[in-house]
Image (cartoon, helix red, strand yellow):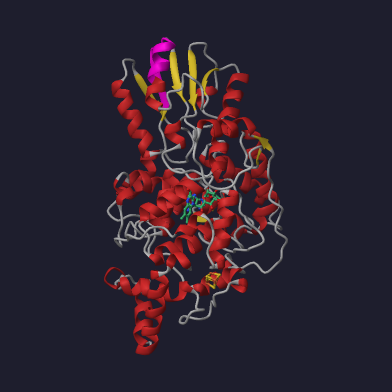
Amino acid sequence: MNVLRLILGDQLNYSHSWYTSCYSNVIYLMMEIRQETDYVLHHRQKVQAFFAAMRQFAKWLRKNGHRVKYLSLNDAENSQSLSANVKACIADLNIERFEYQYPDEYRLDRMLRNLSTDLSVPVKAVDTEHFLYTRGQSAGFFTQKKAPRLEYFYRTIRREFGILMEGNKPAGGKWNYDTENRLPYKGTPVVPVPLVFRNNIEKIDSALDSGGVNTMGTADSRILFWPVNREQSLKLLGHFTQQCLPWFGTYEDAMSSQYWSMFHSRLSFALNTKMLNPGEVVSAALETWQDDKSRISLPQIEGFIRQIIGWREYMRGLYWAYMPGYAAMNYFAHTRALPHWYWTGETKMNCLAACIRQSLEKAYAHHIQRLMVLGNFALLAGVHPDHVDTWYLGIYIDAVQWAEITNTRGMSQFADGGIAASKPYVSSARYINRMSDYCKTCIYNQGENTGACACPFNSMYWDFFLRHRELLSANPRIMLMYSMWDRFKKAKQYAILDRAAYCLEHVNEL
Ligand code: FAD
Ligand code: SF4
């Protein structure tokens, strides 16, 4: 029986059980299609990286004796549609069964389900064998009466997989070492030079040009620095555990205009394409910690493990529990368009200019830049979550919808009304000034609320809370803000709101 097995661009799992044996009747189908390059405006490096990683994966399959049908972007027989290409292959290759791995994106999941009912051959769907929990298991947490917070999910998964446990107790006696982490960076210790690769992507880049694929951001037309195969992904993991892990937790929230990735791992692309498995990332980090506890403290390893088995798995569960409705949530009924400078970095606000320019240059910003600068401003300005989603889904190298939308619409924009986060992640300049050096060279004054030089974040922060008083004042984590505001003198309140009104009206010129 001839079998066609589909491999999507984010299903590059080198350890999947599909590949343990070679069968002459099994053909693996991979495709570069306009359907995927064009559904949102992607960063050019993101398209380059996905295609380069897919080509490397196909090469590895062939080297290991598997049969591969690879449709390059501009192949004449490529119809640019997933369904049409699958149908054509089934007809042309005399296929008698079609198999696919469950997609991680709702849109593709629906598409493949619909396609399955439309095909004349039997269809089988299998797990991607990537995440710790299956899709149903992680989504199951959210179908309980009250959506569980990350902490509950994280403790359950740690217990179940015996990660950082001493018997029934968490290692060191505490589940969470946040209070010992999250310091601003003051120039020491030395931030490691980020490990980058020199992948030749000339052919891919010219295919994008000749195909007329529209992209954003800057990119080299010859060299791509992101990891595009298993070997490079493992090297990056090794670099992280050896060089960055000793300070990961401490400076997890620190931002610096000098260092674009600080002590972060930059593993998200390798993880989201499945070139790396979360289980092996956790094991590698734990092993390094076990071998070198004098250099890597418990708060560092715990902080990192929480990202991989906590946040990452949690967001995936949330996605499958709430899609497709999640993509339409807009708790604050925000309507504004994203300021145009999100696409150029041309704003006088130094923190935003730095984070946007970095994102355009590297297709990367670390978590706090995404959350407390870029997302913070969009939320304070009342930008429609659709616009925010589109931007985030396009610009970042790791942006796949299950990880993007839950973070953007949920954690960052609170558009889900509090499923992902217990309160909106907004701040005034005080937080940005404490955690970064951006304010030092900004033309706005981080310490002022009113007047033409006052940092826009400060007045917009208060304005946001007042605009949404009805929705937020009962939140126990926010109540204090309202009593603080009510104690301000009337004149101060008016001046702050005046400045906010100016900033909101002239948001494109800030
Ligand atoms: P590190 O800081 O080194 O963390 C290690 C790993 O933990 C990451 O590689 C990632 O796999 C995982 N992780 C950490 N936090 C999260 C989280 N909140 N959700 C999911 N995984 C997490 N992550 C994406 O993978 N894709 C996205 O499209 C994405 N969009 C985001 C949008 C916003 C508004 C925010 C606030 C966060 C977003 N994140 C997204 C989460 C996080 O910012 C990135 O995973 C991280 O910055 C990637 O860089 P890193 O690999 O250096 O991460
Ligand atoms: Fe950003 Fe305000 Fe600081 Fe300027 S002063 S860098 S706008 S937080």
Please say if 333 is above or below 446. above
Residue 187 falls left or right of residue 467: right
Q: Tell me what residue is drawn at x 37 percent, y 79 percent.
A: 497
Determine which quarter of the picture holds residue 186.
bottom right
Answer whether residue 158 is visible to the viewer in this image. no
Horizontal relation, residue 379 to residue 51: left or right: left
Residue 21 relative to residue 501: left or right: right
| Chain part drawn in magenta | 87-100
Whether residue 379 can be seen here:
yes
The quarter of the picture where the N terminus appears is top left
The x and y percentages for residue 306 are 52, 53
Q: Position of residue 18 (x, y in %)?
A: 50, 23
Where is residue 102, by image quadrant? top left
Q: Is 91 contained in the magenta span?
A: yes
- Asked if the stretch drawn in magenta spans residue 258, the answer is no
How many numbered marks, from 0 up? Answer: 0
Depth check, front residue: 258 or 223: 223
**Whole-percent x, y for residue 40 in the image:** 43, 42
The residue sitting at 47% across, 41% down in the picture is 132
Looking at the image, which residue is at 36% across and 34% down?
109
The percent coordinates of residue 128 (x first, y second) are 46, 32
